[in-house]
Amino acid sequence: MCSGSKNNAGKHEQQAKADFELDTLFDENTILVQRTLRSGQSITYDGNIVVLGDVNPGAEIIATGDVIVMGSLRGVVHAGAAGNVRSVVVAFKLLPTQLRIANHITRAPDGEAADSDVPEIARIKNGVVTIEAFNSEWQGK
């Protein structure tokens, strides 16, 4: 009977740990845009923005949090607009005309069309905007 109590206590600890980890993954301050943004369209939001579609050249996304595009990002994007250098930009095809994270600004190099077959993540690393392949092991490092 005592071993059963220990097992239950262990299960409760594991559940509490799992609940805590899930809580850190969710942010209620997120909007979901279920369409492609076309030239001239702009979305500004105090939080995270997730786009289920493309962001075409001439379109703009500004978020105080993270920006995730489930498609091609070829417009202007500004994550961490309130100064959050921990914000990230993730896209299936990351080809922005301009990319900003907090007060760091970059743009695509002239004449180069880097086309990746994997989703990419842009973030600030050592004070510089860095773009690299996104993988599921990335945990805000």
Image: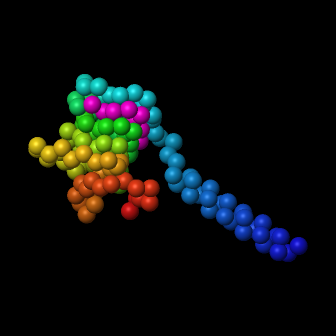
Q: Is residue 35 left or right of residue 105?
A: right
In which quadrant will I find the N terminus?
bottom right
In what quadrant of the picture does the C terminus appear?
A: bottom left
- Tell me the residue at 39%/39% (across/down): 70
Residue at image coords 32%, 47%: 117
Estimate the x, y position of residue 72 in percent, counting from the top left. Answer: 31, 37
Res. 49 in view: no
Which of 68/79 is in front? 68
**Apparent side of residue 78 relative to residue 23 in the rendered image (left or right):** left
- Does residue 7 show up magenta in the picture? no
Provide residue 16's location: percent of width, then percent of height.
66, 60
* Residue 51 part of the magenta-drawn span: yes
Residue 140 percent coordinates (x, y): 40, 58
Q: Looking at this view, name the residue that lies furthest to the right.
A: 1
From this viewpoint, which residue is outermost toward the front?
117
Taking 127 as reference, is 42 above or below it?
Answer: above
**Image-quadrant location for residue 2:** bottom right
Q: Which residues are magenta?
A: 48-56
Q: Residue at horizontal 72%, vertical 69%?
A: 10
The residue at the far left in this view is: 110
Q: In the displayed structure, would residue 127 be above or below residue 25?
A: below
Tell me the quarter of the picture where residue 34 sits.
top left
**Hey, which quadrant is residue 77 in on the image?**
top left
Q: Is residue 104 visible?
A: yes
Which of these two is toward me, 62 or 32? 32
View extreme (bottom): residue: 2
117 left or right of 2 in image: left
